[in-house]
Each structure stands twice: as structure tokens, then as C-alpha cells.
């Protein structure tokens, strides 16, 4: 869950911070405004109960947001893993035959052309690492993607996990695969960056609705 939180875009972090911190800020402001006023014990207890309930609703909204993001990313990964594994199979066999002259760029560009959700793709061989790093993405994002890929070479992501990054301020899912030769030995890695911005958008919408519903209930309880 921590990896998902750290990988969320800034706008999602902003909403989650608002969800969790808003009750505490409201309680603090209310306490300062009523500091020198005569308020009964029942009113003070009610105020604290409202703040605690609001904070709890905020935490629930945060958990729901993370759960939606995780479910959406798992669905994207399940949908695209077969294509990425097939790409790794083509790159692995070609890299074995000609490790220095393999046209990684051509294969990655072709993959992006037939996979509209693929925003970027990178690949490298184990013997040459950064020297044979290939990057296929939009020209304006090439430097950013290449710098990110160089950081991945030292610690390639585990294909069994969920890996995220932000590109252009949008959430992206990284689908990794290992290049292997005919004997099954690893010869490199390929990482495909899939668009996942709609996952964050839907999670934001759901969290906002949950937050509005929870605070509406709390406001109704206060009026009673």
C-alpha cells in the first residue's frame, strides 16, 4: 500500500491530505473561536465527537481511494502483460543472435504503434546495460523517460509487483518483463509504461463523493 501512495500523482496527494487534515483544521479553528466562551460539557464532547468522526470518514475515503487505484492498476496489468511478455520474447531471441546490433528501438516503436495505451517503452541487455538502452516515446518526453530508465537499470522492477510512475503529471503503470535466451537464462529487461490516468481520475471522483456524503451525514447529526 505504501508503494501505491508514493506513486500517486500530486493532485491525488492533495485531495488525500485535504480529506485527512480538514477535520483537524476545523476542530482547531473551532477551539480557538470558542476559547473564551462559556460552552457546556455536552457541546464540547459533541464537537470532539464530530471531529473524530470526520477524521475517521477521511481515513475511510483514503483507504477507498488506494483500493480503487490498486484494483484499476491490477486490471491494466492483467490486460497488457501477455503483450509485454510477447515483446520480451522477440527482444530476447534477437538479442541472443546479435547482442550489439539488435534493433531494440524498431521493435519498441512498433509495439507502441499497435498498443495505443503504451506511452513509453524501454529495453536493455544485461551485458551492455546503459550502452544498449533503447527508448521509444514521444520526442518531448524522451529525456525524462531515458533518465528514469537509467535509474531502473541498477534495480529492475519485479514483474510480480505493481509499479507506478508519473509522466506529464499523469499516473502511469510500469509493466516489466525479463528478456531470456533459448535456455531460459535472463539476458535483459523491457519496461512498458502504460497510461493509467483514468484510474486516478475515477479514484478521485469516488473519494470526493465519499467525503461529501460523510460530511453531509455529520452536518445532519450536528443539526440534530
Image (cartoon, rainbow, N blue to C red):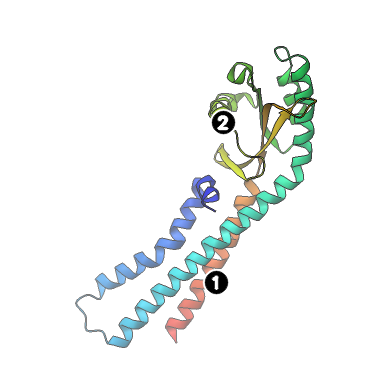
Q: Can you give x and y, in whole percent of width and height, for residue 144 in the image? A: 55, 28
Q: Is residue 90 left or right of residue 158?
A: right
In front: 154, or 47?
154
What residue sits right under mark 2 in the picture?
Answer: 152
- In the image, which disc is placed on residue 168? none
The residue drawn where x is 56% and y is 31% is: 152
Binning the other alpha carbons within 10 Å of mark 1 as few (below 14), some (14 to 19) or many (20 upward) gives: few
Whether residue 171 is visible here, answered yes or no, is: no
Binning the other alpha carbons within 10 Å of mark 2 as few (below 14), some (14 to 19) or many (20 upward) gives: few
Separation of disc 2 and disc 1 at Cα? 42 Å
The residue drawn where x is 32% and y is 87% is: 42
The residue drawn where x is 76% and y is 19% is: 96
Upstream in sequence: badge 2 or badge 1: 2
Badge 2 element? helix
Q: Is residue 136 above or below residue 52?
A: above
Q: In terms of image quadrants, where is residue 177?
A: top right
Q: Residue furthest top?
A: 101
Whether residue 37 is visible here, answered yes or no, is: yes
Q: Is residue 218 above or below residue 198?
A: below
What residue sits right under mark 1 in the picture?
Answer: 213
Q: In terms of image quadrants, where is residue 164?
A: top right
Q: Is residue 132 left or right of residue 208?
A: right
Q: Is residue 82 left or right of residue 130?
A: right
Q: Can you give x and y, in whole percent of width and height, for residue 44 in the image? A: 31, 81
Amino acid at each position: 500500500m505504501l508503494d501505491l501512495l508514493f506513486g500517486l500523482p500530486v493532485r491525488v496527494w492533495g485531495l488525500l491530505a485535504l480529506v485527512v487534515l480538514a477535520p483537524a483544521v476545523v476542530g482547531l479553528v473551532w477551539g480557538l473561536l470558542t476559547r473564551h466562551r462559556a460552552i457546556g460539557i455536552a457541546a464540547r464532547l459533541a464537537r470532539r465527537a464530530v471531529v473524530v468522526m470526520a477524521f475517521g470518514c477521511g481515513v475511510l475515503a483514503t483507504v477507498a481511494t488506494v483500493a480503487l487505484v490498486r484494483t484499476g492498476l491490477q486490471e491494466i496489468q492483467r490486460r497488457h502483460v501477455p503483450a509485454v511478455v510477447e515483446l520480451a520474447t522477440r527482444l530476447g531471441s534477437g538479442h541472443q543472435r546479435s547482442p550489439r546490433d539488435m534493433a531494440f528501438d524498431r521493435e519498441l516503436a512498433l509495439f507502441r504503434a499497435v498498443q495505443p495505451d503504451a506511452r513509453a517503452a524501454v529495453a536493455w541487455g544485461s551485458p551492455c546495460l546503459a550502452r544498449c538502452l533503447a527508448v521509444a516515446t514521444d520526442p518531448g518526453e524522451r529525456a525524462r523517460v531515458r533518465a528514469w530508465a537509467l535509474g531502473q537499470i541498477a534495480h529492475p522492477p519485479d514483474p510480480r509487483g505493481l509499479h507506478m510512475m508519473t509522466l506529464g503529471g499523469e499516473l502511469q503503470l510500469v509493466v516489466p518483463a525479463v528478456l531470456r535466451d533459448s535456455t531460459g537464462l535472463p539476458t535483459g529487461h523491457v519496461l512498458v509504461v502504460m497510461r493509467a490516468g483514468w484510474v486516478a481520475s475515477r479514484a478521485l471522483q469516488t473519494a470526493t463523493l465519499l467525503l461529501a456524503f460523510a460530511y453531509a451525514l455529520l452536518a445532519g447529526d450536528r443539526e440534530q
